[in-house]
Each structure stands twice: as C-alpha cells, then as structure tokens.
C-alpha cells in the first residue's frame, strides 16, 4: 500500500528555518517524482517544489525560489524540503505527493500527482 508521511512542521519565527520530511513506503520512490505543495486557509493548494527521480532536476515556485531547497535520499525513501528565511506567508499545511514522471505538464500542477500524504502544519509567526 503506497503511503507518504510528512513530518517536521511546527511554529517558527519569521526569518527562521524548518526542514520537512516526506517518508515513502509501499512503493519504490526512486521510480517517481515527488512534489511539495501547500495550502493556506481560504486559499487554493499551490505547488511549492518538485524533484526528479535522480534528484538532478528541481523546480520551485517563484515565491520560494532562493529560500527553499528540495532534496531526496532514495536509500532512505525520503524527500526533504529545507525552508529558510521563512515569511508569515509561508504559513500553510504542507503536503508531499508523488506521480509518474512520464506524465506531461506543469511540474507544480497538483493534478499530475495521484498520491498524497496527510500534510504537516507550518506556522510562521512572531
């Protein structure tokens, strides 16, 4: 049974850092791309970042470019999202999701990802 479990969320002050983890089980994550998405209250879900199977290709939303870094450790079946210089507008529930890399389209379009984790809350506030 395919499962994604996010962890690492919490409360952080503006300018601070958090690292989210997405642990995969029930499938071979090295065959799939992994994306991070977030949804703030009253807003639509938005794509944050995506990493290719090998980790050699990454994509970022303009709003997080230069502050967030996505990485993966296929030996540990885990993908990470390092979030630095956080802003209050980063407050959201963060989800990881997986999909087939062969499906064409915008890498940060949530519709390309059929499998999702349950989410982890991130709050950026002083």
Image: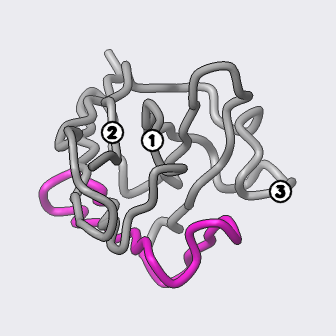
Q: Mark 3 points at which residue?
A: 106
From mark 3 to mark 1, how far is it between C-alphas?
24 Å
Q: Mark 2, residues whose alpha carbon is within 10 Å: few (<14), some, or many (≥20)?
A: many
* Residue for point 62% across, 26% down: 114
Q: Name the residue under label 1.
A: 91
In the displayed structure, 54 sits above or below 39; it is below
Magenta-span inclusion, residue 36? no
Pinpoint residue 98: horizontal percent, then vertical percent. Answer: 51, 40
Q: Nearer the viewer, mark 2 or mark 3?
A: 2
Q: What element carries label 3?
A: loop
Q: Residue furthest left?
A: 76
Specify start and end residues of the magenta stretch as a single range: 55-80
Residues at circles 2 and 3 in contact by the CB criterion of under 8 Å: no
Q: Which of 110 and 56 is in front in this view?
A: 110
* Residue for point 54% across, 50% down: 89
Residues at circles 3 and 1 in contact by the CB criterion of under 8 Å: no
Name the quadrant of the N terminus.
top left
Q: Is mark 2 on a helix, strand or loop?
A: strand
Q: Is mark 1 on a helix, strand or loop?
A: loop
In the displayed structure, 36 sits above or below 79; it is above
Pinpoint residue 81: horizontal percent, then vertical percent. Answer: 34, 60
N-terminal-most mark, 1 or 2 = 1
Residue 122's tag is 2
Q: Residue furthest front?
A: 126
From mark 1 to mark 2, how far is it between C-alphas?
5 Å
N-terminal-most mark, 2 or 3 = 3
Residues at circles 1 and 2 in contact by the CB criterion of under 8 Å: yes
Q: Mark 1, residues whose alpha carbon is within 10 Å: few (<14), some, or many (≥20)?
A: many
């Amino acid at each position: 049974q395919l499962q994604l479990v996010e962890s690492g969320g919490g409360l952080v002050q503006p300018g601070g850092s958090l690292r989210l983890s997405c642990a995969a089980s029930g499938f071979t994550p090295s065959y799939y791309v992994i994306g991070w998405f977030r949804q703030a209250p009253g807003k639509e879900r938005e794509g944050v970042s995506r990493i290719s199977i090998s980790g050699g290709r990454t994509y970022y939303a303009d709003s997080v470019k230069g502050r967030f870094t996505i990485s993966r450790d296929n030996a540990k079946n885990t993908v990470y999202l390092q979030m630095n210089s956080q802003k209050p507008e980063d407050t959201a529930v963060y989800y990881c999701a997986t999909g087939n890399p062969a499906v064409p389209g915008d890498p940060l379009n949530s519709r390309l990802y059929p499998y999702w984790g349950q989410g982890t809350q991130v709050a950026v506030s002083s």
